[in-house]
Image (cartoon, helix red, strand yellow):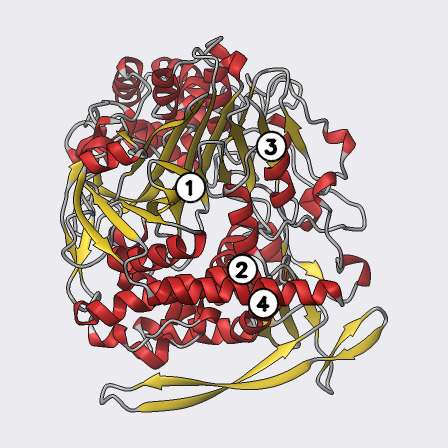
Amino acid sequence: MHHRKARWAIVLGLSLLAAHAEADGTQGEILWDTYGIPHIYGPDLVTVVRGYGYAQMENQAETLLTNIAAARGRSAEYFGPGSGNANVQSDTAVRTEGIPTRAVSWLEEGSAFQRAVIDAFVAGANEYAAQHGETIDPAIRQVLPLVPTDITAGEQNTIHFTFMPEQDNVPALIAAWQKGGLAAANALAASFTPSGSNGWALAPEKSASGNAILMGNPHLPWGNNQPVPGLGIYQWMEANLVIGDPSAPTLNASGVGFPGSPYLGIGYSDNVGWTHTNNTIKNADLYELTLTADGGYQFGGGELPLQHTQDVIKIRQPDGSLAAQTIDIFESVHGPIVARSGDKALALRVAGLNAPSLVTQYWGMIRAHNLAEFIAANAALQMPFFNVIYADRDGRIMYLFGGRQPVRHGGAWADYAGILPGNDPNALWTATFPWAKLPRAVDPPGGFVANSNNPPWTSTFPQAIDPAGFPAYVAPSFMAPRAQNAALYLLSIPRLTIDQVLAGKESTEMLLADRVLPDLIAAANASGDATAQQAASVLSAWDRTADAGSKGAVLFERWFDTAIADPDMPKDDTINFYSTYPKFRVGWSASEPLTTPEGLADPARAVADLVAAAQAVLQAYGALDVAWGDVHRTVLVTHDPTFQTAVPLTDDPESGPDDPFGPVRVVNPFPAQDGSQRLWSLGGDGYVQIVEFARDGAHAQSLLGYGNASRPGSPHVTDQLPFFEAKTLRPAWRTRQEVEQHTVSREQF
């Protein structure tokens, strides 16, 4: 009884505080700096969060509102069916996954603190819309006002039903299953491609200054600021959140979050900091069901009924009217049915749907003063995904294989990479690991932790996490070239300066080239083929980087693409869960994780692919030694006022290859949309933070290469691009004095 009274006292107090902050429009202040980064000041947390909602709308209104429309399952209602019926398909998926209904229950189940934070954020966003609604296109303005369930729906749509299924290859598995059945899908499961990111934490003994250093570098698509539409769910926005006296705050937090999230997803304070990388956790599973004639499915030697409900999607027509479409939703014990074919169906099971308190967890992390307090917040595991790389002012560092790891009935990780048998109760997991049983390394003897989407076993050297101490299904065993490149760099320097951390993070060196070029060049020179020998000459002179001026990188890239597409080229089976590679002469080995793989198993076939690649490069670009930046371009875009048409702003030389080549700095390309043979940048290296935790607090540099805003006409799409092109960062202004010196405008809220 006393606990209930205490809880309601907290609810009342926080609600009154939020209401008071909302009513008093002078309580908070936003100082906007040169790069469109808001520095948000307020006397208490809810005031600052209200300002955060306001600022997100000011920089990202169209992105935020279209993301919310999708999370509500109402995109077709607001914007019509979409190209290829995309909005209808999205709304159907969101309703099938139960996101709107679960958003309500999450809001009710979360803590009073969480509700106060969400309410404040929503109030701030709506406050901006009330004052500046005319700057938003009427079609998008329909989404207003925001309501608290938009936040809990957006979390699910982003993390649980986009990031996690994509990481576990769910969309590709469904497509393969629909075309070729279970065999085709499980063949695809042999090639697993995690999205890229880098995270490093250096202990004082590994740092030249004697202070802990954190480097964070998530790799995601560049949101709505690149030419491919529909990627706004990946947009980052940087902010500085300052609570209390601006000159001596109780919290000074900086970092990035997704528009619509009332917290920093990656960030740091004067005391602690963290970054995330996608981990190899397998917790979004597909199950193949055998359907029965009377509407059920086989399970455990018997039959269970499918749970059936209906929902109605509204679809805006060209004349503005709304058409109604009824959808049937079916669910098994595994989860919702997401695909059907004959008497078979696929059900999707996602971890973490019983963890409604992401907001509480992340505010607990950023408000932590030390490792113990950070762990206390993080151990709630409300985030079902991501590695955590951590450093703090006390000199502590940590790597954690984070998220909701299913407790399975034996087997190896690869046994769960494909589609699982829906009739087998033993394949259905019902529990997940507690935090204390997850792989982790705290203050390891090597003085650093580093993760580039590799399994936990190779996240520090000497290796501190023994795979024998965990079930074989927790993670596979491999270390791809990018992770090796990062670890080798950190091992090569006894104590790193900030400049050396930056240099290593910005490396475009293709480690794959170091491993295979000696065999390829030798075989080409011995082949007697003039084209092969000419290509070998270019590759011999190449510096093995993908800097904009590098000559030879385009040829090597085309050889690799040709080789992996060649059905006669044998393929690697030692790091194939990461990407497809030609078969190496020496495959990757857990006993030699930093020096394997090496060489080419079939040099003759590799030479044939080199000849084909050389001919293609000559035809496309007129020279074998075309510069990387002449082919790879950074094209950032803004949009017209309707947010429907992309308007290119830049066409600049780009530095950085794709992930499989093993750089630390990754840029993901896609074919240019201007009819040329060039490649445009889709994503990859976007946000970067390098933080040094000195005794007087955090000193940081950061960058969001594609800019801190996505609104039509904003000057803050291209203004950070010069830093990105120069492979450097900008100072992160955090003290009130620094911020005042670089303030271009200020607002009261």
Label 3 to label 2: alpha-carbon separation: 22 Å
- Is any atom of residue 725 visible in this view? yes
Q: What's the residue at 41%, 90% (across, down)? A: 324
Q: CA distance from mark 1 to mark 2?
A: 50 Å
Q: Which residue is mark 3?
A: 371
* Camera-nearest residue between 590 and 696: 696
Mark seen at residue 114 = 2
Q: Residues within 10 Å of mark 3 (few under 14, many from 20)?
A: many
Q: Which circle's residue, 3 or 2, is located before the other in the chain?
A: 2
**Residue occupied by mark 4:** 106
From the image, state whether disc 1 or disc 2 is nearer to you.
2
Choose the circle earlier in sequence order: 4 or 2. 4
Residue at horizontal 34 percent and vertical 28 percent from the top: 610
From mark 1 to mark 4, how far is it between C-alphas?
46 Å
Q: CA distance from mark 4 to mark 2?
A: 10 Å
Query: Which amino acid type corresponds to the residue marked 1 in the rendered image?
Result: Ala
| Quadrant housing the C terminus | bottom left
Sort mark 2 into few (<14), some (14-19) or many (20+) by Cα contacts within 10 Å.
Answer: many
Amino acid type, residue under disc 4 in the picture: Trp
Mark 1 residue element? helix
